[in-house]
Amino acid sequence: MMLGASELYLITFFGSIFMPSPNLHISTQSILSHNSFYECLRIRRHVYAYARPTVNSESEDTNPVHLEVSCVLHELSSVGFAQKRFAQTMDMLIAERCILEKLEEQSSTHSERIHQARLTNLTWLRKCAKEMGDDQKVALFANEMLALKKR
């Protein structure tokens, strides 16, 4: 049986195999996935707390600026999208976007990886906005993607 990215990530994070039983209903599997990734996000927020931005009046972001936190947010948003929780998915994707933008500003290492992650993030933001019926955001994210690709 081939493992997907989500399962492999859980294996590398928790050190054990999380394989939903084939007998479980799809919605039960997605709830288990959501709960596992949310716990992973909680742990990552704690582990990388040193990278949390200083909170001021302009920013209330509680996510540490770390690539692994953005990866977990992305996986959580994928699960949310599959569950048709589009508002929650949009929030997670926007949080991921903020982290990726800060990482790009701060770091010269992993620049190609961060650039690709930003393009993927904008693709998912556009898909989510399309599902929500927000044509204005769809156009906005499409234009941002074009501008990012030109860099």
Image (cartoon, rainbow, N blue to C red):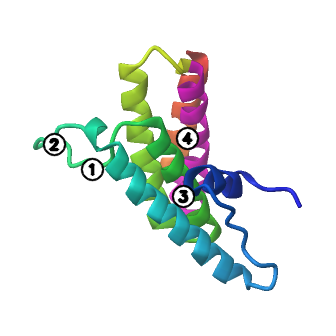
Residue type, numbered disc 2: Val
* Residue of label 1: 62
- Image side of residue 102 versus residue 32, left or right: left
| Image vertical order of residue 25 relative to residue 98, above or below | below
Nearer to me, 78 or 9 = 9
Please name the residue shown 41% across and 28% down the image: 103
* Residue of label 2: 55
At label 1, counting other C-alpha atoms closer than 10 Å, the crowd grade (few under 14, some 14-19, many 20 or more) is few
- Image side of residue 127 versus residue 22, left or right: left
* Residue of label 3: 77
Q: Secondary structure at mark 2?
A: loop
Decide: marks 4, 3 in contact (CB < 8 A)? Answer: no
* Residue of label 4: 122
Please name the residue shown 49% across and 41% down the image: 68
Nearer to me, 91 or 150 = 91
| Image vertical order of residue 32 relative to residue 103, above or below | below
Residue type, numbered disc 1: Thr
Determine the CA span between mark 3 and mark 2: 24 Å
Please name the residue shown 67% across and 76% down the image: 29
Residue type, numbered disc 4: Leu
